[in-house]
Structures are given as C-alpha cells and as structure tokens.
Image (tube, grey):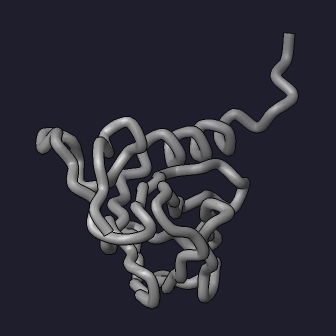
Amino acid sequence: MTCKYNTAIVRKQLFSTCNYSSTITGPVVICPGDIPTYSATNWIPGNYWNKSSNLSLSNAYTNPTTVTGAGVNEIAWVSVNSSSGVELKRYYIWLGGLAIVYNSSFPPSLKSDQIKHAIF
C-alpha cells in the first residue's frame, strides 16, 4: 500500500502545529472603552488571529493586534491560527469589569468555570 500524501510535508505540518510554543500576552480583563493590544510569540508568516463573536480585531493578519469588546459581563477569547486554519493557542478574556477569581492556581488566562463572581 502506498501513501497518497507527501509524508515529509505532513510530518512538518504536524510538528509545527503540535509543537507550537507560543504565548499570547495581553490584558485578561477588558473594561468598557478599552482598546488593548494582544501579541503572540513565535508568530509565523501565514498565522492569523481569530476571536469570539463578542470581540472585534483591528487586523487579523498582524502581530500584535488590538481588540475592542462588544459585550459586558461575559467571557471572550482570541486565538492564533495556522494558515491551514488549525487553532494553535487560545487566550480567554473577561469583558465588562473587574473579575474576582477565587482560584489563584490557574494560568493568567481566565476560563468560564474559574470566574465565581464579578464586581462592576
């Protein structure tokens, strides 16, 4: 049986996707009126930003990028995607004000089940 795929290309794509060691940096909380900047380390030409429906991006194809929030009191996210559309890294954001989180052992990117209460 012969493989119909170029294994060298497949191996390279899997390696670059599975071993993508990027970090997304930017604020974890966006208050109304804020226009924060997010950046990703190890940005590769062809990568692009994706986002949740409650955010707007200044430019999906530049690093860094700025975002504006369209919601309040909810979770949002930005992610870095490969040119083939594979999500490489996701970063969670709280929209609406100061979130008080009771679990301090998680990474700096918020997840919805870790937000217990918010004060606005």
Q: Look at the picture and state if 27 lies above or below 80.
A: below
Which image quarter holds the C terminus?
Answer: bottom left
Which residue is rendered at x = 37% and y = 64% of the image? 24
Decide if residue 87 is on the left or right side of residue 72.
right
Residue furthest to the top in view is 1
Q: At 53% from the left edge and 82% from the top edge, which residue is drawn?
A: 68
Report the number of discs. Answer: 0
- Camera-nearest residue between 25 and 113: 113
The reply to whether residue 88 is in sight is yes
Q: Position of residue 29 (x, y in %)?
A: 33, 69
Q: Is residue 4 left or right of residue 117?
A: right
Query: Can you say whether 56 is above or below 105 in the image?
Result: below
Q: With respect to residue 68, does 112 lie above or below?
A: above
For residue 98, above or below residue 92: below
Side of 3 where 25 appears, left or right: left
Query: Of 10 and 37, which appears nearest the observer?
Result: 37
Q: Residue furthest left?
A: 104
Name the one closer to the observer, 57 or 97.
97
Evaluate whether residue 25 shows in this view: no
Task: Locate residue 80, reporting x and y percent.
Answer: 53, 61
Q: Nearer the viewer, residue 8 or 60?
A: 60
Toward the front, the furthest residue is 120
> Residue 46's spot in the image, x, y percent?
64, 71
Quarter in which the N terminus is drawn:
top right
Residue at horizontal 53%, vertical 46%?
A: 17
